Image (spheres, rainbow, N blue to C red):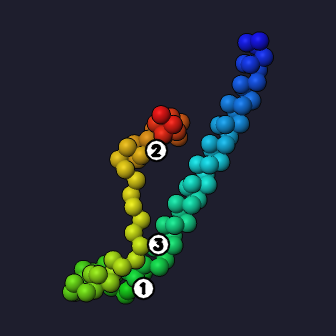
Amino acid sequence: MTRQMTALARPTTGLARIGRRVADALAECNYAQRRVFALMTAPDAYLTERDQAPDCYAEFLFRTSSSLVHEPTAADRADRAHGPDRAHRRHAA
């Protein structure tokens, strides 16, 4: 009985690993799409002097009026730096 369960577990583990990789790739594509949209629709993208500080508070508010992309937490950034398996193990717990 144990051999039969082990033989069935190997393909299942492989399929789970492939599924995780596909999910990671889709999540990264989703993040990239949201980031490109935020950058393309930001008012700063259309300013001729965007590297200079705003002249007044109203201009500052106009420049920051686009949607903001939130940075991942420090724990999530550390998990990405150490590989995808660690991030899945932490979120599964």
> Which residue is pictured at 39% across the width and 58% down the height?
71
Residue 87, percent from left and from top: 48, 40
**How far apart are the alpha carbons under marks 1 and 2?**
33 Å
**How far apart are the alpha carbons under marks 2 and 3?**
23 Å
Quadrant location of residue 12?
A: top right
**Which amino acid type is marked by label 3?**
Ala
Q: Which residue in the structure is indicated by mark 3?
A: 38
Q: Which mark is residue 46?
A: 1
Mark 1 vs 2: CB contact within 8 A: no
Tell me if I can see residue 86 in this picture: no
Badge 3 or badge 1: first in the primary sequence? 3
Please tell me whether residue 10 is drawn above or below residue 50 in the rendered image. above
> In the picture, which quadrant includes the N terminus?
top right
Tell me if I can see residue 51 in this picture: yes
Instruction: Characterize the local packing of mark 3: few (<14), some (14-19) or many (20 or more) Cα atoms within 10 angstroms.
Output: some
Q: Which residue in the structure is indicated by mark 2?
A: 80
Badge 2 or badge 3: first in the primary sequence? 3
**Which amino acid type is marked by label 2?**
Arg
Instruction: Characterize the local packing of mark 1: few (<14), some (14-19) or many (20 or more) Cα atoms within 10 angstroms.
Output: few
Q: Secondary structure at mark 2?
A: helix
Horizontal arrangement in the rendering, residue 47 relative to residue 22 (left or right): left
Residue 77, percent from left and from top: 40, 47
Foreground residue among 4 and 72: 4
Please tell me whether residue 71 is drawn above or below residue 14 in the rendered image. below
Residue 49, percent from left and from top: 33, 85
> Which residue is pictured at 55% across the width and 55% down the height?
28
Badge 1 or badge 2: first in the primary sequence? 1
Q: Secondary structure at mark 3?
A: helix
